[in-house]
Amino acid sequence: MLYIFHGTNSIASSNKAHVLVNSLRTKKIDAAFLEIDADNWSSEIIKEHAGGQGLFSSKSIVLLNRVTESAGAKEGLPDLLEIMNESENIFIVLEGKVLVDLKRAFEKYAEKIVVSDVVEGAPKKEFNIFALGDAVSSRNHFKAWLIYRQAIESGAVPEGIVGTLFWKIKTMLVTAGASKTAGNYSKDELSSLMEKLIVMYHDGHRGMCDMELAIERLLLTC
């Protein structure tokens, strides 16, 4: 399956693509994740992941992050779009402004395309999804709440925000290693937050809680 995010508004495209990535990784915890950029681009890696499932997981999620900044990728990517879309694994392509030929190839093969272009007129400040994770990491409740409200008002979906928070906290835990603390949190506190986010995500989908309000309460108390 192939999802495409591109357009002249690179911040908006990046935010939307990463919201999808985080959401998918939250839903498919056993899925392998691979990010490919212009520096580590290889058509063979794409073919390998398009043709089969990972050894240790049922599916793979592959993010191609502005790979066409590489001349080889710019030439080879169009020929790989069809097999990516037909694959059982999930491919997400993030690009900036694209040329007409590549845009047509996207339209021909992609399952879904999201275009984010800069709109003429008064500039609108885009929400930076990573700022929320940083605010939570610094344990600044009020700042986290303000950024969260900006995210909701800019169109971010609660599921994607839960995914962003989940992977931020998981990263903090991994970084802490053998230490009992991770920044401003104890490892027990971070583990508890991860568990709450997982429960919140599933309860929200079952209609057992209002996910938007549940996130708000968590940010004000975590």
Image (tube, helix red, strand yellow):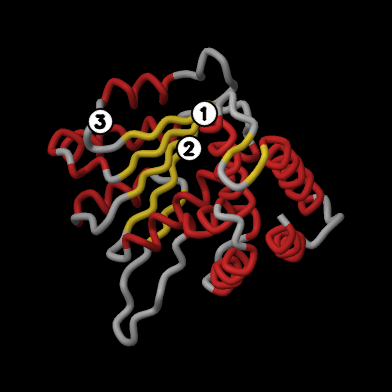
Residue drawn at point x = 86 percent, y = 55 percent:
208
Q: Which secondary structure lies at badge 2?
A: loop
Whole-percent x, y for residue 181 in the image: 62, 36
Q: Residue 88: give its label.
A: 1
The answer to whether residue 209 is above or below residue 102 is below
> What number is the disc on residue 1?
2
Corner quadrant of residue 120: bottom left
Name the quadrant containing residue 62.
Answer: top left
Residue type for callout 3:
Trp
- Identified by mark 2, the residue type is Met
Asked if labels 1 and 3 touch by Cβ distance under 8 angstroms, the answer is: no
Q: Of tags 3 and 1, which is closer to the observer?
A: 3
Which of pointers 1 and 2 lies earlier in the amino acid sequence? 2
Residue 195 is left or right of residue 93, and the answer is right
Q: To which residue does mark 3 refer?
A: 41
Label 3, label 1: how many angstroms apart (C-alpha)?
21 Å
Q: Nearer the viewer, residue 76 or 173?
A: 173
